[in-house]
Image (spheres, helix red, strand yellow):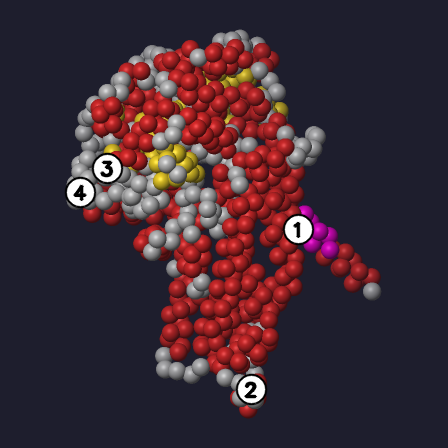
Amino acid sequence: MTLLKKGTAVLAAGFMAMSLAACSSNSSSGNASEKKEVAPVEKEGDKTVVRFWHAMGGDTQKVLGDIVQDYNESQEKYEIKAEFQGTYEESLTKFRSTKTSKTAPALVQSSEITTKYMIDSGKITPVQEWMDKDNYDTSQLEEAITNYYTVDDKMYSMPFNSSTPVLIYNKDAFKEAGLDPEKAPRTYSELQKAAKALTKKEGNSTKQYGFSMLNYGWFFEELLATQGGLYVDQENGREGTAEKAKFQGKEGERVFNLLNDMNKEGSLGNYGTNWDDIRAAFQSKQVAMYLDSSAGVRNTIDTADFNVGVAYIPHPDEVDSEGVIIGGASLWMTNMVSDETQQGAWDFMKYLATKEVQAKWHTGTGYSSINPDAYEEELVKEQYKKYPQLQVTVEQLQSTKKSPATQGALITVLPESREAIVKALESMYEGKDPKQALKEAAEATERAMKLSNRTAQK
Amino acid sequence: MKEIRSKKFIFYTLLIISALVIFFPIFYAISVSFMSEGDVRARKLWPSDFTFSNYGSAFEQMPLLHYLKNSFIVSSVVMIGQLILSSLAAYTFAFLQFKGRNVLFFIFISTMLIPWEATMIPNFLMVQGLGWTNSYAGLTIPFFATAFGIFLLRQHFLTVPYELREASLIEGLGHFGFLTRVVVPYCKTSFITLGVYSFLTTWNMYLWPLLVTSDDSARTVQIGMKQLRSQEMATDWGGVMAGATIIVIPTLILLFLGQKQLQQGLTKGAIK
């Protein structure tokens, strides 16, 4: 496993080097519609082959595979080839170094934080172009999701698998601690109180922690956005190129202070940076409440041998919740393939966005539907009867207020910034002053932004 | 007498303990491969009831046999390629006299200092330019030249007594005959070491195969493993471990067969 980790780090480094080279070599990248050399149309029988690179492993791969198969059987013109390319990072590295060739992908799935990277890569065709050609009505899609992928009023990619953060808690533990299992904490003070009540100690060791949060930058961004706090300046980088970090302001401080207080009280469990670890801790009742991605909810309910509750993420007492930023990934159309292949890719995107397919995807994986009509489908309704908790994730997303904060930050260096946040949280758990830790993370982010902006200008 | 026995006792106790410690992850992986998902999450050490469904899902989720075949082909080709190229190069450095030989040799050796990851992207661009993506050629040929292999074999070749060379000259053997008939049998252990070593490293390779293959035609088994892991969602560890258990079997067989030679070969090269 360490080898894998090392590998990813190396990949990331290589990827950085590549992107620097890419930035300096094609400065006219914004002009994506200008035709360049494309791969020849690949045929399989009479069908045009559309290669689709994705990063969906495990159970999600099965669901995706079924959908692709259904599509291929439903029509005669295109054959989608779903090809797994490793994690989002690995797949992105590959995409960045791929040149036009006969195996070039027409569709690439890339995670939300790479949005700006992809736009600047010069290798994609904004999906808006096809929407305009086809008079596609984007209002049928979930606005809270499309907001993220809309830059300068243009949809650059088609959202596909979208997830949001939720608070997951152990209802049985709530009962045991004398709390109302139907009423999850909403504000920081409620959360803190509940966490204290849920913490069970035996001598010097803690048998059950009240609360835990995966040490992952995404959750910090969410806790910030739900207060309406901006991550970077220029309206989160959506009005222009961001140059300053804004997350170290009072909103960010509130998040850090909350975690710091709970850590000092001993009600916060720290399970590092691995999703599987924190979930295992919850399953084995070492943690009573934690933040998770909505995509993991159903699986958690299925495997837990106690009652599981799902709630909105907490917000400070003094401000109202503004909602959440969506996470997950979207589909990008590359300009390395011919018009005909692009047409096929677009047709498949449209198919994916239909309510029937979205219903299947939503129930099969736990990702939110990008088409709100899907929630009216029988399939979804049935599942909600079985898992009423899943509805919470949808409600939270739909009640999100549209603002630059909940649209999410648009910067190329988000991966580096997340890394800085992780470090800051770690050093705070070890005793560093929260304000100082936050300040260092902001400085690291600004350094990375400065470097990236400078290379982009060349 | 008694002292020796008690010494032995302590010695073996320590050995057993360290063997257990080292074996534990493998044991646990195999144990997890038989567990239900609930057991895995509850961090059980032993499955509460044995299930083979994980093996079923591992086979179902990826073309495991196809991947195993690819891995086997790629690993074997790299092994054979490395053995041939390294022995030829090592022979040159050990037996032929020419100007700048040592300099050249040290330049070769110095490439060991550069981690291959550093050259990965340029390599990839070259392979892509040659149109070798998604082919066995792209997976194998970049690994034929190995400084480690040349070094290992050269060190062993140097121990071949010069008298053997003289004798073979009298017998009328040329360079190639001397290499295949005398040097190779004499240095058998080093060849086996290098063979096993290169087979295993190629078998375990992940990044490179991931980069140069984008569809299933030439993909190796390690990428298949990665496919079993989910992103963002909970991973089905039972299935992952079932897959791992299956793909570790060929490596284990190879290790058991080559263990003795492997030990001998590695120490010979190092201690000389």
A228 and A394: which is toward the camera = A394
Residue A120 image label: 3
Give the chain of mark 2. B
The 10 Å Cα crowd at callout 2, few under 14, some 14 to 19, many 20 or more, is: some
In this view, the mark in front (4 or 1): 4
Rendered view: A220 above or below B101: above
Rendered view: B24 above or below B42: below
Write down the residue under mark 1. B18
- Quadrant in the rendering for residue A431: top left
The 10 Å Cα crowd at callout 4, few under 14, some 14 to 19, many 20 or more, is: some
Q: Is residue A92 left or right of residue B22?
A: left
Q: CA distance from mark 3 to mark 4?
A: 9 Å
Give the chain of mark 4. A
Q: Quadrant of the C terminus of chain B?
A: bottom right
Residue B14 shown in magenta: yes
Farthest residue in the right direction? B1
Q: Quadrant of the N terminus of chain B?
A: bottom right
Give the chain of mark 1. B
- Quadrant in the rendering for residue A403: top left
Q: CA distance from mark 2 to mark 4?
A: 65 Å
Task: Pinpoint residue A336: horizontal percent, then vertical percent.
Answer: 27, 41
Same subunit under labels 3 and 1? no
A361 and A427: which is toward the camera = A361
Question: The residue under label 4 is which amino acid type?
Answer: Ser
Q: Does the image show residue A194?
A: no
The 10 Å Cα crowd at callout 3, few under 14, some 14 to 19, many 20 or more, is: many
Q: Which residues are magenta?
A: B12-20
Residue A379 shown in magenta: no
